[in-house]
Image (cartoon, rainbow, N blue to C red):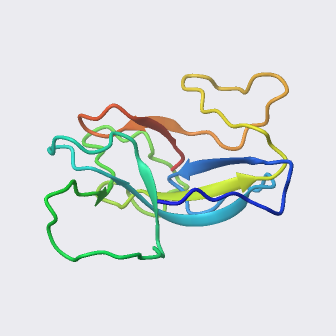
Amino acid sequence: MHEHYNKSNSSGGATYIRWGRKTCPETGAQLLYDGVVGNSHYTHSGGGHNFQCLPNDPQWNRYTDGFQAKNYIYGVEYQTNTYNPFLSTNLQQPLEEQDAVCAVCWVPNRSSQLMIPAWLHCPSNWTEEYSGSVIDIHMKSSCLCNQS
């Protein structure tokens, strides 16, 4: 894993993951990469509890194919069962069994970012980048704001 820093902008900026979309909103945000949501399997012990936005075009280092007696990371898909909070005329197809997608966005003129669950509006002097519904993964302890 490598940490990356933008050398071209000394003022910083803020990065965030837009869960459920492949693009960044038109708020001045720039797409760093898009991908699929990954996590450990809900029936496996160990592994991370936080979601990862896995790039569609990974840059491989040294690796060995096959089982390595370590934790697996899987692509996440939507399981809505009988309740689907994402029913909308905007959806091209039902979310059930679809891969969860993501986009990593950078906003050069922001200094921080925060996801506030159960709030409809930003605090004063903040800018809303996107809104969505809080979702989680079965038997894990990480939640995210999904925009589908």
Nearer to me, 72 or 56: 72
Nearer to me, 97 or 106: 106
How many tags in the picture? 0
Nearer to me, 93 or 79: 79
For the point 70% across and 26% down, the residue is 121
Nearer to me, 71 or 75: 71
Q: Quadrant of residue 83?
A: top left
Q: Is residue 92 left or right of residue 128?
A: left
Q: Is residue 63 left or right of residue 60?
A: left
Q: In this view, does 63 lie to the left or right of 25?
A: left
Q: In which quarter of the image is residue 140?
A: top left
Across and down, in percent, residue 129 comes to 71, 43
For the point 65% across and 26% down, the residue is 120
For the point 33% across and 55% down, the residue is 76
Across and down, in percent, residue 116 comes to 60, 27
Q: Is residue 46 left or right of residue 89?
A: left
Across and down, in percent, residue 44 comes to 15, 45
Across and down, in percent, residue 46 comes to 21, 41
Q: Quadrant of residue 119?
A: top right
Residue furthest front as drawn: 62
For the point 82% across and 22% down, the residue is 124
Task: Please say if 85 is above or below 22.
Answer: above
